[in-house]
Image: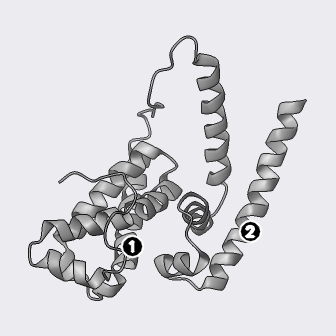
Amino acid sequence: MSFIHSTPSSDETTPDATYVERARRGDSSAFEALVRRYYRAAYAVALALLSNSMDAEDVCQDAFLKALERLDDCREPDKFASWLLRIVRNRAHNFRAYRRVRATESLELAGAASREDSAKDAERADLRERLEDALGELSEIQRQVVLLHDLEGLKHREIAGHLAISEGMSRQHMLKARRTLRKILGALGEHLHE
């Protein structure tokens, strides 16, 4: 099964529980609809935990495969998103633990820059590294809230549902995260102008 990195094209009015029940009966298109519906949110959570896009993609695909294998374990099909994101978080934690054990292997940035674009690519890579470092200073929940809100465009009510927290806590985590990011990135900006 290949996972598609596209915007959701599934019928937005069809409840998750309907797709889950159809997928349990062997309808692969129903599970693909769930993948399309939740891939971006799953990716945002994985990226928040791993800070590496390739690792996040791997964890997402692994999590969706695990979800498909264990679909009968989803006790509340109408809360599929929360169940799936728990699997994503667990898979990301496992991956991070595995990576710590294998810390002797270095991770390289994907893609080689052409000679004429090397300065721009280096600048982008530096900016990306600074942003990833800044996100790395946030707590895990703060990273998840920021990425789900800013990358995925989810509202605090939706984030609260996905992360099993209150809407007020989602707002609190966002506020604290933005303060921390402003402080870190502001300090970086001052160093750049020196």
Relative side of 143 to 61, left or right:
right
Residue 102, position in %: x, y? 38, 42
Q: Secondary structure at mark 2?
A: helix
Which residue is drawn at the image coordinates 22% and 61% (left, top)? 65
13 or 54, nearer to the observer: 13
How packed mark 2 is, by other alpha carbons closer than 10 Å (few <14, some 14-19, many 20 or more), is some
Residue 191, position in %: x, y? 85, 35
Q: Which mark is residue 86?
A: 1
Which residue is drawn at the image coordinates 59% and 61% (left, top)? 143
- Furthest toward the top, the residue is 115
Which residue is drawn at the image coordinates 46% and 30% (left, top)? 108
How packed mark 1 is, by other alpha carbons closer than 10 Å (few <14, some 14-19, many 20 or more), is some
Residue 60, position in %: x, y? 35, 57
**Viewport quadrant of the C terminus:** top right
176 or 146, nearer to the observer: 146
Location of residue 149 (image quadrant): bottom right
- Furthest toward the left, the residue is 26
Three-letter code, disc 2? Lys
Relative side of 129 to 1, left or right:
right
Determine whether 123 is above or below 27 in the image: above
Residue 14, position in %: x, y? 30, 80
Q: Earlier in the sequence, mark 2 or mark 1?
A: 1
Q: On the image, numbered disc 2 is attached to which residue? A: 176
Which residue is drawn at the image coordinates 61% and 39% (left, top)? 128
